[in-house]
Amino acid sequence: MNNRDSIKNTFVVTGILCIVCSVLVSGAAVGLKKRQEANAELDLKKNILSVCGISYGDDDVQQLYESNLEARLVNLTDGSYVAATPQSGQQADSKFSVSKLDQSETSPISEDPAGIGASRENYAVVYLYAEKQQIILPIRGKGLWSTLKGFISLSADDFTTRGITFYSHGETPGLGGEVDSPAFKDQFASGKQTLEADGSVILNVAKSGAAKPNDIDGLAGATITTQGVDKLIKFWLGEQGFGTYLKVEDKFAQASN
């Protein structure tokens, strides 16, 4: 008589359950992939609208994005626009490169204060908000525990700040995690100067309580995260980031061509 409680039967049943569960989990992951990608793109667009100061509801994100924003691909080496326009979903790429191009096209960077790595991609997606003459640039860099990823919005005429947002980070809640708090982000909406006439970055994210008039007051109790934000802003607005692109005149006229 077969003993259903035998070690052999126990292993057989366990094995069958593992296989069934694996198939179900794999099927769910594959089935939900498109929805996850759509949600990631929607969240990205919410952040872009937010950094532009455009109010939105859950039902009108797509319409507001399409009617207000134009995504353009920039060659970071010479600051020119690339003819190709990013396709749906490609804006969410973590390295801000576009899959239609060879993502191995990178350039070595001489210094890496923001923790970007040994090289920087040659292409990046920027966003143009023509009504308010704002340019929205993707930014990223190391904080204390994570890589912070977000956007900074600048006035196209004098490059003063119009907003900032971080859509991905793993900083400590209540401390470094306050990079995404209204109190911190509102400082960037007040028109801080970012660049000197020669292109050097003059915007500083200072230690909490030590900010000068044109500085951003940093996060209390989060010195390393504050320094990380300062370094990533200086990197991406500087010569190794979007510095060459920022020197190009009449970016909106170029984009309409």
Image: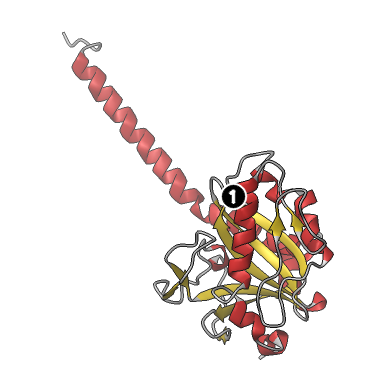
Three-letter residue code for mark 1: His
Coordinates of residue 193 in the picture (x, y in percent): 77, 71
Horizontally, is 98 left or right of 59 in the view?
A: left
- Secondary structure category for the residue under label 1: loop
Residue 105 in sight here: yes
Between 207 and 255, the residue placed more toward the observer is: 207
Q: Residue at x 22, y 18 (%)?
A: 9
The residue singled out by tag 1 in the image is: 169
Q: Nearer the viewer, residue 106 or 209?
A: 209
Residue at (33%, 28%) from the top-left corner? 17
The front one of 109 and 146 is: 109
- The spot of residue 66 in percent (x, y) is 71, 71
Q: Quadrant of the C terminus?
A: bottom right
Q: How many marks?
A: 1
Q: Is residue 62 left or right of residue 16?
A: right
Residue at image point 63% right, 73% down? 126
Q: Is residue 56 visible?
A: no
Q: Looking at the picture, does residue 178 appear above or below residue 150? A: above
